Amino acid sequence: MHNYSCWFDGAYTWQGKWNPYGSAVAGAVIRAEHGDLLNTTKHVGSGSCNVAEFGAVSLVLERLLTLPVGQAVVKGDSKIVVNSLRKSKPAKGLCHDASIKAITLLSCLLTQGWKVDLCWVPRGLNTECDALSKSLSPLTH
């Protein structure tokens, strides 16, 4: 069986008092025994830090769907994302749609026979994705 180590992180650029819906940016990394399969940064919409975090985990899950079925450990520093996916419970507010997308992607993986372990890690253990997510904009929160 194929084994994958995955990390995600999101960053959010606040646009100011009169435009609170800033830019949500996602960083994602997937590694397998034979090397990196994904190392990317992408704008994933606008809204909030949580929109960015759900967008980041969705990048990971979308890429896993294109790979041979296996086991994936998916790590991120967002407790909201990890708990929402573990419980298959959509988040509320601005990140509702983004959370539904991530839950749907995870469900597709599980249906195909994937084993996915979702892990919360402290930000200090997620530095590569943190740097990726902040690389598209110098003004992140």
Image (tube, rainbow, N blue to C red):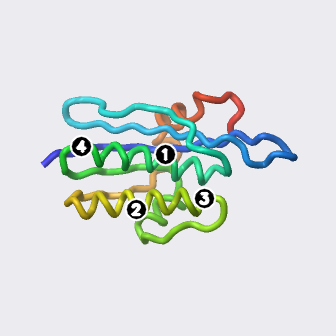
68 versus 50 height, above or below? above
Q: For residue 3, what is the image quadrant?
A: top left
Which residue corresponds to mark 2? 104
In percent of the image, x 66 and y 65: which residue is there? 93
Quadrant where the C terminus sits is top right
Which residue corresponds to mark 1? 56
Q: Which element carries disc 4, helix, strand or loop?
A: loop
Q: Earlier in the sequence, mark 3 or mark 4?
A: 4
* Label 4 neighbour load within 10 Å: few <14, some 14-19, many 20+: few
Check whether the beta carbons of the residues at disc 1 and disc 3 lie within 8 A of each other: no
Check whether the beta carbons of the residues at disc 1 and disc 4 lie within 8 A of each other: no
Coordinates of residue 20 in the picture (x, y in percent): 78, 48
Label 2 vs label 3: CA separation? 14 Å
Which residue corresponds to mark 4? 67
Which residue corresponds to mark 3? 95
What amino acid does circle 2 point to?
Answer: Thr
